[in-house]
Amino acid sequence: MTTMTQTTETSSARKCAGGDCSNAADTLQCPSCQKLGKESFFCGQDCFKRNWNEHKKEHKSQKTGHFNPFPTFPFSGPLRPVYPLSETRIVPARIPKPDYAKDGIPRSEQVFVGRHKVKELSDKEIAGMRKVCRLAREVLDLAAAAAKPGVTTDQIDEIVHNACLERDSYPSPLNYGHFPKSVCTSPNEVICHGIPDQYVLQDGDILNIDVTLYHGGFHGDLNETYYIGDKALADPDSVRVVECSRQCLEEAIKIVKPGMLFRDPGNVIEKHAKTMDCSVIKTYCGHGINQLFHCAPNIPHYAKNKAVGTAKPGMCFTIEPMISLGSWKDKTWPDDWTSTTTDGSRTAQFEHTLLVTKDGVEVLTARTPNSPGGPVALPSAAAPVNGAEVAVNGS
């Protein structure tokens, strides 16, 4: 660690560069930043020393051109955004687009009259949903196959974008509410809505990839969380939260049929999460999906929720439980999208688009025999659940 140098210049408006400091800066400047031609002033030596471990990361970013756009934001975990974002990817004019593609405003979802009515799809509309969901599964599988150590989340975005275009489909997230990319990539403590950037995936990460396609006038939505490298597969906590989320979705799907109350999946999900000593994120929920990206009904994932309504044949909606190793509370980055756990604990999510049939449910985004990923067993001989030790892997 270096010490600071003092300049003769003063500025009463200058703010201390310490991430945890709101004081005005003194004339003390980081010498490493000086050599790189950047000004970084601190209020004193103690503040500089206290912030050194975080501040020194900026020296590397200045050499690579990468940077954290929110250096003073109190992040809850170790992950940081790595900017600049790549240029907005282009969708050719030949591909039909949803109404928000041009200006970011989903006006069709903002209609007040009948917005709480859940649509029951016709046979023709169901065929459209089946097709777009099959295409969405293909795209997610391509992205998942590329998710390895050394790959950036922006590269995954490029794969998803191009795969959508190859299928004459629009990547639904692109410009939805001004979201800047074609897929959501959410590593580690990111709950959802992570923006693909220059972050390089590390051996030991877990990564959620959330894909939605718009094709033939319909949206198909699904996501899975994947293990990045062998270290992730060997980490009991990472496996516990990922497999808990996977199992929560599976258990919830089992109860979907005509007559199911929309509040019921949350009871099933939270009950199962507790058996694996995990918590359920409450802010985000499953949603209706058809010609609209998001519409009625809402499907909360936590117990004792107040969701209104009953499932009927022809209804399409998602269930997508977000499960945390720690707190269920969330915190949003200044990009207004990236949502993380407030305590920095790891989180996982799985999602399917579901069709209620006359006698049960059809998983429109179901995995194929060749889909990457899939369930794994806990890597340890025993795992703590609700304070007790339980045997796993047959031991």
Image (cartoon, helix red, strand yellow):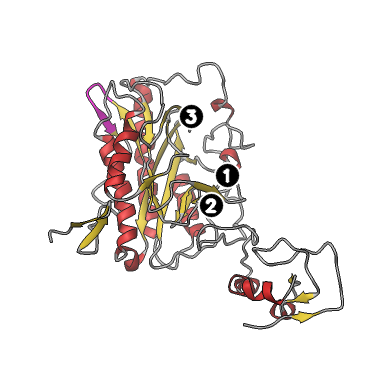
Secondary structure of residue under mark 2: loop
Q: Nearer the viewer, residue 138 or 352?
A: 352
> Which amino acid type is marked by label 3?
Leu
Magenta part of the chain: 357-362
Q: Is residue 38 part of the magenta span, yes or no? A: no
**Quarter of the figure with residue 57:** bottom right
User: Residue 42 at what x, y percent from top left?
Assistant: 73, 71
Q: Is residue 359 part of the magenta span, yes or no? A: yes
User: Which residue matches tag 2?
Assistant: 195
Q: CA distance from mark 2 to mark 3?
A: 22 Å
Reply above or below: 132 against 63.
Answer: above
| Image quarter hosting the N terminus | bottom right
User: Residue 324 at what x, y percent from top left?
Assistant: 39, 50
User: Which residue matches tag 3?
Assistant: 292
Q: CA distance from mark 1 to mark 2?
A: 8 Å
User: Residue 87 at what x, y percent from top left?
Assistant: 61, 54
User: Which residue matches tag 1?
Assistant: 179
Reply above or below: 60 against 252.
Answer: below
> Which amino acid type is marked by label 2?
Ile
